[in-house]
Amino acid sequence: MSRRTERPLRMLIVGSEWPAPTFLDRLFRGLATRGIEVWIAGRGWRPRRRAFRESGLRWLGLPRLDRPLPWRLVYLAHHAGGLLVGNPLRGYELLRRSVGPRLRQSLRRADRLLPYARKPFEVFYFPWNGGAVNHPGLFHLDVATVVSCRGSQIQIAPHDPRRAVLRRGLPRTFAAATRVHCVSQAILDEALAWGLDPAKAEIIRPAVDPQLFSPADRPLRPAGGPFRFLTVGSLIWRKAFHDAIVAIHRARARGLDVRLDIVGEGPERQHLRFTIADLGLEDVVRLRGFEPPTTVRERLRAADGFVLPSLSEGISNAVLEAMATGLPTISTDCGGMAEAITSEVDGLLVPTRDPDALAEAMARVASDPDLATGLGEAARRRIERDFRLDAQLDAFARLLEGAVADQRARSR
Amino acid sequence: MTAAPVASTERPPVRFDLARPEGATRRPPASGPIVLVVPTFPKLSETFVVRHAVGLVERGWDVQVVCRSSPTAAWRAFPGLDATMAQRVHVAPPIARAEPTTVGRALGEGLRRPVALARAIGRRGLRRGVARRLADQPIRALRPRLIHFEFGTLALEQADLAAAAGCHVITSFRGFDLNFAGLETEGYYDPLWPHLDAAHLLGEDLWRRALARGCPEDLPHALIPPALDPDSYPPRHSSRAGGPLRVLSVGRLEWKKGTEHALQAVAMLRQAGVDCRLRIVGEGAHLPAVTYACHDLGLSDATELLGARPHAEVIEEMRAADIFLHLAVSEGFCNAVLEAQAVGLPVVCSDADGLRENVDDATTGFVVPRRRPERAAEALQRLANDPELRGRMGAAGRARVRRHFTLDRQLDAFESFYHQVLDRPPRAGGGAR
């Protein structure tokens, strides 16, 4: 393609929190190394961290929504002025689009349109459906748009009666987007129900850097000691960590010394804390709280097995990381997990909401060293084959370039 | 005190025997009020506090209520309440910052009770010591005979007051106090135990949980379960023939209430070929999890989420249902289950906390292990296939509520409890009022 030699593709990421979760951070930085100019739209000032400066990412500061009204007006006026001076016709058109009869609504619309429109971006990337739904104005700027479908915002939120805005917005954003990225076939299938045109959709599964996660060079389990399972994720209901705690209880009732570390923080903490106390597992199940990625890597290397009791997942990054570390991994068969784990080959899949099945799988892994080692080694091979970070980044860069080409063809 | 008990060499029993008939015969003490301490009064979801206070007043006790807020709107929900209680409710808002009036009050307090104030400041630092002392002032000003904290967490916050009140101090411990509050802090209630004369718990299970939370084994205590007025619960409409089985769940949508387990049980029941519908009353933060479970378990057409409903409508829902299902993971005692029995609805519930004492297993319903929806499904199936059993269990539930859980019985028990506590010398001798 000749465009690359002209100048790098300029992409703006809309609707991502900063700091972004590890897997998005990895994607953004990776794309920056692929010769794409990655801008991140965030509220407030550019992060001061040296890591951010050195990552090659750029920052588009947006007015913070918690500022007083006059401040926000000044900020918006500054953007509107810039737009009008730069290209009076387009600026007028954009202003007209954002101003309505109600002040608050107009402010919100202007907030979510004007600051994004000043730089000549070639593609807007929405890493979450919610972000796309919140920025309807950006789909009509003659800029390519790419939306990611990742999991709960397709699988869970639309069923929540209080999320009518998202439910209504999904079909609209799918219709308006140039391309739609799905993290798994399962998510794609579910998104069809919300109006996704399969011709626009592309599956790029999440990935890990196999160099970063390496198996521990020790036998899986010190002879005679306890078998230590690990699980990682936000403490939210859809991760159903309480099922894993109950499963530990039931596996121990069979006389197996299995233990569990839970790394992560969130609103379900009280629930988990109570479950642990109620089942008398204070010395067996530990809530480790939030830990940075480097510590999580250490924990993975020190664990004997990994378990994910989720009710819904796109494809769990935590599971991919555990597999890359060569851990025997047990996951519920939800969302796209069956696309990452072939049960009995490179991991075990069990039904959701079924602590008995989870306990059974835990007991098998903990009591059969050959099975555990075999699953772990196969998992590592699977990651090296199908879930490599560089392959994912290449596919993503192609997706973005394809979207830009589509948009050009469309506007011609 | 006119009739101080003769000091005996034998230690008094740890658990009060509330069946002693003195509640009915003895007069309430003449000097000094009973002060009930609650966060908010009146409050719709804490109707039991209102009934407790009013019931005691009607029986001649001098009851005063100290709370942090008393919203006008809430009073409207209790018609006729101001006649008995308006003069007896004292609002002591928490002190957040040093406003001029606060500073003035603090200076006044310093002049009147310099030692006590200095002690509070020494223990908690200037700001918090003064704030605590001022917040406790309305209670001390009432010169109570007995202070009854309606919640353990509340008593813990005012442990200083309990220590220095110079009167009897008792606390109710409810499900939240023992199951959740301060779970991550070792010895959370330790500052409170030495200052309590007695504790009130809803049942045996909560007493065990209190012991596990560090409650001294010799703390005198009384077990008094919740109660209701059976006459305001008309019996259930007699079962219609045909139509799907109507299962009802009532409770806030929180993980504690185990709504997802109820959905799983109903899904299993349907898989076993029983045509049934689940209606769920209540709303809460767990709503997305519940709606997702409906979708995930293929129950979207078989369940109805009714949201929060006024009490009268909830009773009507109960009267129109066939089975009450409540698979909580954690539950103090559960008034809804009690009400279902009062209406004559057979109950399938988990064995969480007080539910075991609430429902008589195999008589007024089935009590199954918690976190075991498959066991609940079995129980549901037995009831589904046997309308006669449903009728029998419903009738037994009505009889049980009338025998054990009436307001009158509860008030008798509280009166007896208070009398027996007051017969003993107060623990907290510290005279600094």
Image (cartoon, coloured by chain):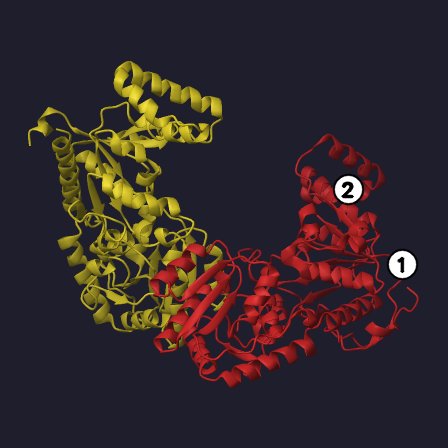
Q: Crowding near pointer 1: few (<14 within 10 Å), some, many (20+)?
A: few
1 vs 2, front mark: 1
| Chain to which mark 2 belongs | B
Give the amino acid type for the residue marked by disc 1 in the picture: Ser
In the picture shown, does residue A263 fall above or below B406?
above
Q: Position of residue B220 (x, y in %)?
A: 73, 69
Residue occupied by mark 2: B117
Asked if residue B190 shows in the view, the reply is no
Q: Name the residue located 90 percent from the left edge and 64 percent from the top edge.
A: B1
Element type at marker 1? loop
The residue at 28%/40% (across/down) is A25
Residue in view at x 44 percent, y 29 percent: A102
**Badge number at residue B362:** none
The hue of chain A in the figure is yellow
Is B55 in front, or is B112? B55
Q: Colour of chain B?
A: red
Name the mark on residue B31: 1
Q: Going by the image, does A202 lie left or right of B304?
A: left
Instruction: Look at the numbered discs 1 and 2 and tell me whether their residues touch, using CB distance below 8 Å.
Output: no
Disc 1 from disc 2: Cα separation? 27 Å
Residue toward you, A359 or B67: B67
Residue in the foreground of this view, choosing between B269 and B26: B269
Q: Quadrant where the N terminus of chain A lies?
A: top left
